[in-house]
Image: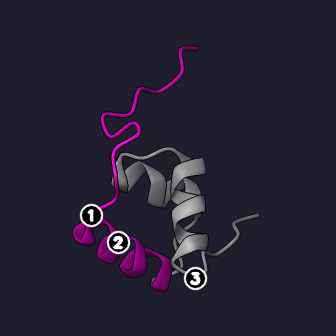
């Protein structure tokens, strides 16, 4: 299975994406779902959320 390609690779985060991240995290969405909605990798999304002090729900 081929790895997913992300259009936003190594691109800086903008305010709109940060707002969407806060909204989705606030609704209790998991990391994988948020990353897919933002078209970012899970690692990038997790790192940015940590930097911005945004808590992401852990799905089991």
Instruction: State how many labels appear.
Output: 3
Packing grade of label 3 (10 A; few <14, some 14-19, many >=20) is: few
**In the image, which residues are magenta?**
1-26
Q: Residue at x 61, y 81 (%)?
A: 55
Q: Do labels 2 and 1 touch, CB within 8 Å?
A: yes
From this view, report whether residue 47 is shown above or below residue 16.
Answer: above
Q: Residue at x 35, y 54 (%)?
A: 38
Q: Where is residue 46 shown, x and y percent of the image?
A: 59, 60
Q: Which residue is mark 2?
A: 18
Viewer-proximal residue among 6 and 53: 53
Which residue in the rendered view is the most extreme toward the top? 1
The N terminus, quarter of image: top right
Q: Secondary structure at mark 2?
A: helix
Q: Secondary structure at mark 3?
A: loop
Q: CA distance from mark 2 to mark 3?
A: 11 Å
In the picture provided, is 37 more to the left or to the right than 55?
left
Q: CA distance from mark 1 to mark 3?
A: 16 Å
Which residue in the rendered view is the most extreme toward the right? 60
Q: Which residue is mark 1?
A: 14
Q: Which residue is mark 3?
A: 53
Packing grade of label 1 (10 A; few <14, some 14-19, many >=20) is: few
Q: Where is residue 17 shown, x and y percent of the image?
A: 30, 65
From this view, report whether residue 54 is shown above or below residue 45.
Answer: below
Q: Residue at x 34, y 59 (%)?
A: 13
From this view, report whether residue 27 is shown above or below residue 21.
Answer: below
Q: Residue at x 34, y 53 (%)?
A: 12
Q: Earlier in the sequence, mark 1 or mark 3?
A: 1
From this view, report whether residue 43 is shown above or below residue 4.
Answer: below
In the picture provided, is 29 more to the left or to the right than 58?
left
């Amino acid at each position: 299975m081929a790895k997913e390609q992300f259009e936003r690779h190594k691109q800086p985060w903008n305010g709109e994406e940060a707002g969407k991240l806060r909204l989705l995290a606030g609704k209790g969405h998991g990391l994988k779902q948020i990353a897919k909605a933002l078209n970012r990798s899970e690692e990038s999304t997790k790192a940015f959320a940590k930097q911005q002090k945004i808590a992401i729900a852990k799905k089991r």
